[in-house]
Image (spheres, rainbow, N blue to C red):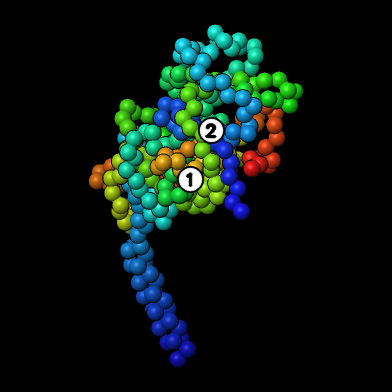
Amino acid sequence: MKDKTSVTEILQEIDKMSTNKEQEDHITKEFLILDCHSRLIGIQIEYLREVFELKDDNAISPIPFTPSYILGIIHIRGEIIPVLSLSEILKIEEKEFSLLKLVVIENQFKIAFPVKNILDMKAIKVKEIRAIRDISTKAEEQFISDEFDYNGKQISVMDIQKFYLSNYIL
Amino acid sequence: MIKEIDVLLLDINNKHIGCKLDEVEKVISDISGISGNTDVILPRNKGVYRLGDLLKIQGMVTYSSVLLLENELKKPVIIAIPAITDIVKLKTSKILAVPEYLRKKQDPFFVWGFFMNKNDITMLITFAYLTNAKVKDGYHEL
């Protein structure tokens, strides 16, 4: 009798594990996919606060005596938000075009990145996110560990938590 | 009672700058004809700074006035500036603080606050680091 119960329990356990696996297959993470100098970056939606159109370059006021990756500040509804260069942080080669949108993210505090364009907001199944295969620079290695495919293109996932713990912030 | 400070306003290449008037010993306006060049009347060995250079603002700046500041040794520090746009009374409650992150990253401490003036964000700057005046704990004393 005891053995029969055990077998039932084991079968139930197997069934539960199978259900969990099916559920896991459906777990997704949402990303904002952005274009920064033709490099496609994914930022998890949980860190995203706002996206703005940049009217002109003058909207960002430069702050003297700060490191070069700090482009300046922007004033949004009574709040002063530091604007940082994503291309300099990730050592992405800068191309000749304007960065037209501003992405505001928040972990411990708000910061903003100017980008060329926002491509999409997409839920990606966790099982489709993989460890990055080719890390081209040391800077990327620091903040980009995962990637996923989107419309035949590779999207590098920026690890915002790691970024907020880096020397760029601390 | 809300405290007010007098702020001298300047525009440099469409950037709006303000500095506390009581930091300035004297303002000499209209050093006319000295576009982009202060050498003629202000020899470099007298500690002449151009505000555009200090703010790392790119592009041509027309200097038409100077500010005279005094350092701890009572020697003048001269700042070449564009024409003064205005002098306004600013309620300290209207000043937006510099985010803590920028306080840490800014060295020397130059921009100490912001305020909105006619829909434009204006940076409040201090010359304290040029004159060796003290800025308490990175905060400008009002």
Q: Write the residue at 64% across / 27% down.
A: B25
In the rendered image, residue A31, in percent from the top left (x then y), is placed at 35, 52
In the picture, measured across the screen, residue A152 lies left or right of residue B113, that is left
In the rendered image, residue A86, in percent from the top left (x then y), is placed at 43, 38
The residue positioned farthest toward the top in the image shown: B40
Q: Write the residue at 55% across / 50% down.
A: B93
Residue A163 drawn above or below residue A27: above
Label 1, secondary structure: give it.
Answer: strand
Q: Write the residue at 63% across / 17% down.
A: B47
Label 2, secondary structure: give it.
Answer: strand
**Which of the numbered marks, if any, corresponds to residue A80?**
1
**Which of the numbered marks, if any, corresponds to residue B18?**
none
Residue A93 drawn above or below residue A32: above
Between B132 and B70, the one nearer to me in the picture: B70
Q: CA distance from mark 2 to mark 1?
A: 21 Å
The residue under label 2 is B8
Label tally: 2
On the rendered image, what quadrant is the C terminus of chain B found in? top right
